[in-house]
Image (tube, rainbow, N blue to C red):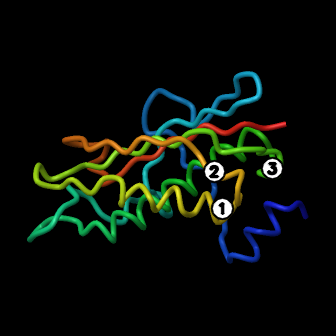
Amino acid sequence: MGAVEARLAELGIDIPSVVPPVAAYTPAVIDGHHVYTSGQLPMVSGALPATGKVGEGHGLIPAADAKEYARTSALNALAAVKSVLGSLDRVTRVVKVVGFVASDPAFTGQPGVINGASEVLGEIFGDAGVHARSAVGVAVLPLDSPVEVEIVVAFE
């Protein structure tokens, strides 16, 4: 067992199976020494755990819940990486994370939501998990998902 796989076991994190595409794209591609993932939704067993906009108030998804969905999306992105590399132990650095948050117009906490993705990548990869990042509020995401995360990793 490699270092990343051992760390996942230590953290009690299971990388899920790669989520099948819901449109005309592939979950991840390799270019040079980088893997680029498509945007990953927080799918669990083929379904979204929640749908709608993130914000405060009746009918909105609380930011704390959305942060967990961002974490799940990041794990789904790692599944996509693993599907093309064969092992996450080949990852040498998480280079970039881009997170999208379907936001109520008054919601401005997108960075805190996408911390769910950034924090789990840091837990798994340590210093190699420190990355550049964007956290963007949007009107709507595919399937009415509250969040979507894509990552770029370097590998050997």
Q: Measuring from the top left, give residue 128's x and y in whole percent.
A: 71, 51
SS label for mark 3: loop
- What's under tag 1, amino acid-wise? Ile
**Which residue does the image show at 44% across and 59% down from the upper left?**
115
**Numbered label attached to residue 87:** 3
x and y percentages locating residue 126 in the rendered image: 70, 60
* Residue at screen point 36% across, 53% down: 111
Q: Residue at x 70, y 28 (%)?
A: 30
Q: Which residue is mark 1?
A: 15
Residue 97 located left or right of residue 54: right
**Number of numbered discs overlaid on the protein picture:** 3
The outermost residue toward the top is: 32
Distance from disc 3 to disc 2, alpha carbons, whole Å, reads 10 Å
> In the rendering, at what x and y percent does residue 33 appear?
76, 28
Crowdedness of circle 2 by 10 Å Cα count: few (<14), some, many (20+)?
many
Position of the N terminus by quadrant: bottom right
Q: CA distance from mark 1 to mark 3?
A: 11 Å
Q: Which mark is residue 121?
A: none
Q: Looking at the image, is 153 positioned above or below residue 46? A: above
Q: Nearer the viewer, residue 88 or 20?
A: 88
The first of marks 2 and 1 along the sequence is 1
- Please identify the quadrant where the C terminus is shown: top right
Residue tagged 2 = 78
Name which residue type carries label 2.
Leu
Identify residue type, mark 3. Ser
Q: Nearer the viewer, residue 140 or 156?
A: 156
Question: Tags 2 and 1 in contact by the CB under 8 Å rule?
Answer: yes
SS class, disc 1? loop
Label whose residue precedes the other's in the sequence (3 or 2): 2
The percent coordinates of residue 154 (x first, y second) are 72, 36
